[in-house]
């Protein structure tokens, strides 16, 4: 477990260092993700070491957003004061984005002539 | 030692609020499981509401709470790196969907920014709020940087991003069913593009392929939105 955490931290650190040094407009962990994906493709044995811990973290990804979520209290007055434009824009725009993104995805794949997908599901 | 003295001692230690955060999450996750992952019982939303009530009742300020919660918050970085594992495991499926993904990314990214700005403006938001709301679908660290460049308030953007994530996680399942989209890759990708990490967390609860594509959607949308809005600022300035 500690080894797996070390691997994740090393790649995050590498990502942070490179984005900072090169002043790239993306967060260190996102570059860390890319570097780690390349490493996993290059050395497949690495996946065995980290798989359990990585999946454990990702299964509980919701937990990690809780502290930031509680942070909403800091500006509660702003949200209450301009609730209509905030809620209106967030709900409508998020709904629009969800549907348009998914429809584009499915539509373009259909245009490419690939219809039967093994990842097809029906519920949830 | 009186109860009050004990409380004063504990309430300022990081241990209490770290424990409370994990406890609230376990309760929220159990509730979500009990109702068969019904999207309305979103674990982030439930845990946040429980903790907000606790802070209110105990009169605890957010910085005191965050001293304990920061250990959980810190794990967001390693978790982002960990997204590489399902990405590589589902590599064949990801590569097969590369073109649909890039098309959906371009359209989704533009929709997210333009519709948020237009609706906020129509509903009477001031310019600072409009600038703060533009990157609302993007993962927090990127969104805060974009907001600052646009003349918004990064702290406000952080909140709008979280709210967007929770809204997206709650509405994605019924909305996709309503639209008749049954493909996990498309559903997950849309969740990641529209509702970043919280949408991705929801996708992983539902289906691993959806989670993988959500993670990719989140990462790509962060980069592309930063580029689009960065260019827009450079062009207008």
Image (spheres, coloured by chain):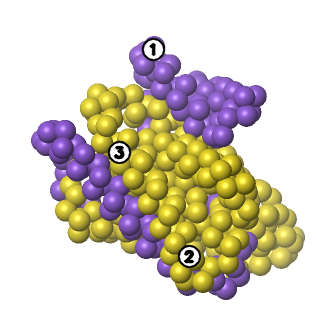
Chain colours: A purple, B yellow
Label 2 neighbour load within 10 Å: few <14, some 14-19, many 20+: many
Q: Nearer the viewer, residue B153 or A74?
A: B153
Label 3 neighbour load within 10 Å: few <14, some 14-19, many 20+: some
Q: Position of residue B113 (x, y in %)?
A: 52, 61
Return the residue at label 3: B103
Q: Position of residue B172 (x, y in %)?
A: 35, 63
Element type at mark 1: helix
In whole angstroms, how far apart are the C-alphas of marks 2 and 1? 46 Å
Q: Quadrant of the C terminus of chain B?
A: bottom right
Q: Is residue A57 left or right of residue A124?
A: right
Q: Position of residue A44 (x, y in %)?
A: 41, 16
Q: Quadrant of the N terminus of chain B?
A: bottom right
In whole angstroms, how far apart are the C-alphas of marks 3 and 2? 26 Å
Measuring 31% from the left and 37% from the top, which residue is drawn there? Answer: B99
**Disc ID at residue A42:** 1
Relative to B186, is A117 above or below? Answer: above
Labels 2, 1: one chain = no
Relative to A77, is B132 above or below? Answer: above
Measuring 33% from the left and 35% from the top, which residue is drawn there? Answer: B98
Please state the chain letter of the residue tagged with numbered disc 2 in the rendered image: B
Task: State whether residue B103 appears in this view.
Answer: yes
Element type at mark 2: helix
Return the residue at label 2: B120
Q: Nearer the viewer, residue B79 or B193?
A: B193
Q: Nearer the viewer, residue A23 or B62?
A: A23
Q: Quadrant of residue B121?
A: bottom right
Measuring 23% from the left and 69% from the top, which residue is drawn there? Answer: B178
Element type at mark 3: helix
Q: Say which label, 3 or 2, has the lower sequence index.
A: 3
């Amino acid at each position: 477990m500690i080894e797996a955490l070390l691997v994740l931290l090393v790649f995050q650190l590498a990502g942070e260092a490179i984005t900072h040094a090169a002043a790239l407009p993306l967060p260190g962990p996102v570059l860390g993700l890319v570097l780690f994906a390349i490493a996993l493709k290059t050395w497949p044995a690495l996946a065995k070491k980290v798989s359990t811990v990585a999946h454990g973290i990702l299964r509980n990804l919701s937990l990690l957003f809780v502290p930031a979520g509680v942070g909403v209290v800091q500006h509660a007055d702003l949200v209450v004061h301009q609730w209509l434009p905030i809620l209106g824009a967030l709900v409508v725009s998020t709904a629009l984005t969800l549907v348009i993104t998914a429809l584009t995805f499915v539509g373009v794949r259909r245009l490419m002539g690939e219809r039967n997908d093994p990842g097809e599901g029906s519920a949830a | 030692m009186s109860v009050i003295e004990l409380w004063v001692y504990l309430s300022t230690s990081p241990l209490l609020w770290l424990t409370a955060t994990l406890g609230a999450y376990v309760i929220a996750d159990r509730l979500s499981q009990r109702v068969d992952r019904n999207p309305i019982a979103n674990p982030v939303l439930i845990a946040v509401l429980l903790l907000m009530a606790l802070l209110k009742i105990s009169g605890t300020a957010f910085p005191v709470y965050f001293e304990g919660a920061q250990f959980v918050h810190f794990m967001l970085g390693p978790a982002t790196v960990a997204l590489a594992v399902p990405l590589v495991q589902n590599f064949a499926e990801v590569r097969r969907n590369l073109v649909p993904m890039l098309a959906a990314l371009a359209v989704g990214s533009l929709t997210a920014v333009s519709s948020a700005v237009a609706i906020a403006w129509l509903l009477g938001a001031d310019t600072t709020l409009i600038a703060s709301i533009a990157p609302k679908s993007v993962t927090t660290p990127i969104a805060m940087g974009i907001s600052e460049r646009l003349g918004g308030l990064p702290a406000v953007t952080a909140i709008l991003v979280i709210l967007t994530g929770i809204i997206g996680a709650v509405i994605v399942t019924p909305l996709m069913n309503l639209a008749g989209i049954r493909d996990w890759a498309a559903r997950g990708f849309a969740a990641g593009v529209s509702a970043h990490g919280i949408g991705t967390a929801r996708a992983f609860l539902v289906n691993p392929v959806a989670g993988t594509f959500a993670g990719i959607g989140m990462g790509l949308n962060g980069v592309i939105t930063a580029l689009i809005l960065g260019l827009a600022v450079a062009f207008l300035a």
